[in-house]
Image (cartoon, helix red, strand yellow):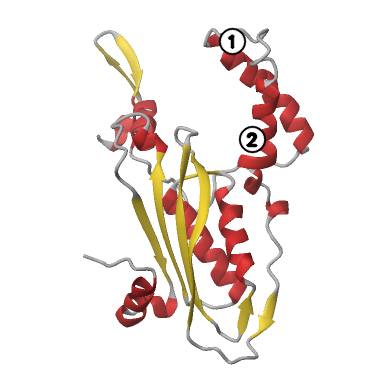
Amino acid sequence: MKQKETLSTTPLKEEKISLSNLLIEEMGDQHKASSVDTPMRADAFEKTDDEKIAAIEPHFRAIMEILGMDLNDDSLRGTPLRVAKMYVKELFQGLNPANMPSMTLFENKFQYNEMLVEKNINFYTNCEHHFVPFFGNAHVAYISSGKVIGLSKLNRLVEYFSKRPQVQERLTMQIGKALQTVLQTQDVAIMMDAKHLCVSSRGVKDDSSTTITTFFGGKFQEEKTKMEFLKYIEIKEN
């Protein structure tokens, strides 16, 4: 597709088709990210959580009604409010920087200067292109520059960035860069292995594949250190 085609509306067989919208849809099907930072509006945090829930509820109610569902049914009556609460308080609470976990550092009194690896951290997030889940395991490693962090904080950092609409590439980068900042070192490695329901439950409907993304900073860009990390998590490069 030519660049000018992405910026114009072109008549095709007497119908006007927005090629920019087609490109956006194609981009979503290919699970591409547009930025390392989560795209947010300038007024994203002007509303309180309760105000957001109150605003989302009627919109989701409208979606269900358009689909033809009878919200007078006892099973469905409370669904719009339940979904609104779930979006704001659970699935997407990581959009708000106020929910960033506290990341206390400690002096490396043991003088442990080797690689620290925490593997098989479970994560569960939602694809920003189709708003369906993808989930799997994160493997996190760092080499101390004089500071260490509690192991549970690594889990909480993964969870925080997972609690927002995501693409796996961005999620991997966000965790890696945040950990570099918190630990005051470039020597950080991340690997994420995930199953995407937007691939298995729709579209190509491939239920057997998983997706692996990586982040290697500092010493982990060196082949020896990278291979040591991959050995620990039992993932081998072809």
User: Which quadrant would residue 209 be assigned to in this image?
Assistant: top left
Residue 204 can be seen, yes or no: yes
Q: Position of residue 185 (x, y in %)?
A: 54, 78
Residue 41 can be seen, yes or no: no
Looking at the rendered structure, the number of numbered marks drawn on it comes to 2
Amino acid type, label 2: Tyr
Is label 2 in a helix, a strand or a loop? helix
Q: In the picture provided, is 125 more to the left or to the right than 101? A: left
Amino acid type, label 1: Glu
Q: Position of residue 99 (x, y in %)?
A: 70, 52
Q: Earlier in the sequence, mark 2 or mark 1?
A: 1
**Looking at the picture, does residue 9 appear above or below residue 36?**
above
**Looking at the picture, does residue 37 appear above or below residue 157?**
above
Residue at image x 78%, y 38%? 48
Q: Nearer the viewer, residue 65 or 27?
A: 65
Q: Position of residue 160 (x, y in %)?
A: 61, 53
Q: Residue furthest front?
A: 74
Quarter containing the N terminus = top left
Q: Nearer the viewer, residue 35 or 226?
A: 226
Label 2: few (<14), some or many (≥20) within 10 Å? some
Residue at image x 35%, y 75%? 226
Residue 65 is tagged as: 1
Q: Nearer the viewer, residue 202 or 127?
A: 202
Residue 182 is tagged as: none
**Looking at the picture, does residue 211 appear above or below residue 186?**
above
Q: How far is the residue under mark 2 from the one under mark 1?
A: 19 Å
Quarter containing the C terminus = bottom left
Query: What residue does disc 2 label?
Result: 87
Is label 1 in a helix, a strand or a loop? helix
Residue at image x 49%, y 53%? 171
Residue at image x 31%, y 32%? 205
